[in-house]
Image (tube, helix red, strand yellow):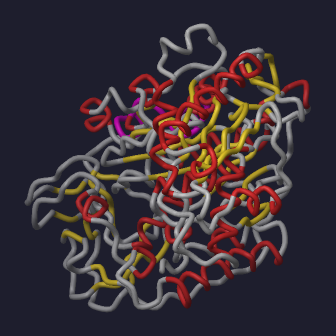
Amino acid sequence: MLDLTAKRATGPVIRLHPNDNIVVARVAVEPGTEVPLEGVVTRTRVPAGHKIATVAIPAGHPIRKYDVVIGFAGEDIPAGGYVHTHNCLMGELQRDYAFCADYHPVELLPEHERATFQGIVRPDGRVGTRNYIAIAATVNCSASVVRAVADWFTPERLADFPNVDGVVALSHALGCGMEMTGEPMALLRRTIVGTMRNPNVAGTVLVGLGCERNQISGLKEEHRLSDGPMLRSMTMQEVGGTRKSIEAGIEAVKAMLPEANRVTRQPVSAAHLTVGLQCGGSDGFSSITANPSLGAAMDILVRHGGTAILSETPEINGVEHTLTRRAISEEVGRKLLERLRWWREEYAVGRDTQINGKVSPGNQAGGLANIIEKSLGSSMKGGTTPLMEVYRYAEPVTTKGFVFMDTPGYDPVSATGQVAGGANLIAFTTGRGSMYGCRPVPSVKLATNTPMYRRLEEDMDVNCGVVLDGEATIPEMGEQIFRYLLRVASGERTKSELLGIGNNEFVPWQIGIVG
């Protein structure tokens, strides 16, 4: 494993493990360049973040990165050759799941030594990092109404309520033309209700059309919800149409504002942080800088009693054995494998999707050859502590420590599930430059490399590229990220919040038939 704990990254390439037969170009390397300490000369230009063979790799032989097989040579690759999608092919991999073999319980810090942040304590003891009122659509037919209501509450109109961060519309494309029973409807309902129950939400106005399949009455009965001061519900057909529904929604939010504004921040333990881990626009540096740095931060958080949610099931494909070995029990490990089995054998079989090998054009341009290589980096966001539980999409996360939630790799859909599960922060690594924002949960963007960070500094919060530049170690970056998360949890605005984005990122997973 790359040791950046005691030394700084220098030179044109990075060796990640003694057993690897590739190195990664730290900067663009021109043809004819002698690779320091490797005894090879590059044969072509190799972009930054891409791979160079350090020995001759015969056709069919494994290609190793971090001492993990990421593919097989599709042709004879000479020493000094460029290794990428044209000659690094997928193949059958042998995985030793070895349930619990690497399980070691976490030594939690004593409560009096744990870090704190300025949190918003709800009446039931949950702790928020933001204070929003939500207006939620049960169906796409009421999406325009909930957006119009949320848009009415401009900063000027909320000026008398300084403790309210805003009014967010939870609009989506589902709710009708779908199965009335079964997992698709159950998933949609638990996503809507889970987001309503997120500790960053003070109250919700629920709006339906009236004739949709996702009836308000069924949703409320299933999740034991009742109208009250901080939960109002209405249907457009009963209220009198679009204009009257918008007016009624505005009045309902107005009635909630005084109560929502009564909150005050107070010191609470970092144990109340639940961080959803995301990566998007990954590149060849994701596994070298931002992802392991975020993993180091999550190791710190877990020792302080907090929770880290790793997701994006397609992006652990091929490295799932590194998680089953850390599982607290075989039962938990097998839950993870069952979710992967469903993806491989039922959901995505025969489809041109990420889990079946091919990553996005942006990932490829950034140096990632296939899903195994991408998964190798993606899984690092979770750190090194034990896998404590596995959740289905949008299920309430109640177990402390490092957990996994089954979600797609598509970031808005994945993060929506995490927020519905209770995440009160999102930490998002990116190499190509994702602009993702989120409401009602702040999204912290972590850049993998300095050139991208400087180019997109208005959108990036933390530059993990300093690891690549030799200015910081991974443990140092982990500590920096952890401290920054505490500041954001205490109210410091992220770049996406300062830009005012995050209004379009409520995207429930659509898994059923539309008819």
The image shows residue 275, relative to residue 359, as above or below, that is: above
Place of residue 266 in the rendered image (x, y in percent of width and height, measured from the top left):
80, 16
| Left or right: 332 as drawn, with respect to 320 | right
Q: Nearer the viewer, residue 229 or 78?
A: 229
Question: Is residue 113 within the magenta segment?
Answer: no
Tell me, yes or no, if residue 441 can be seen here: yes
Looking at the image, residue 158 lies above or below residue 18: above
Residue 296 x, y percent position in the rendering: 61, 43
Question: On the rendered structure, is 64 left or right of 172?
Answer: left
Point 57% across, 64% down: residue: 175
Question: Residue 164 or 283: which is nearer the viewer?
Answer: 164
For the point 67% across and 68% down, which residue is it?
323
* Residue 252 horizontal/vertical position (percent): 67, 30
Whether residue 1 is visible, yes or no, is: no
* Dominant secondary structure, magenta: helix
Span of residues in magenta: 466-479
**Res. 386 image quadrant:** bottom right
The image position of residue 329, as x and y in percent, is: 84, 72
Q: Residue at x 25, y 71 (%)?
A: 84
Q: Is residue 471 magenta?
A: yes
View extreme (top): residue: 160
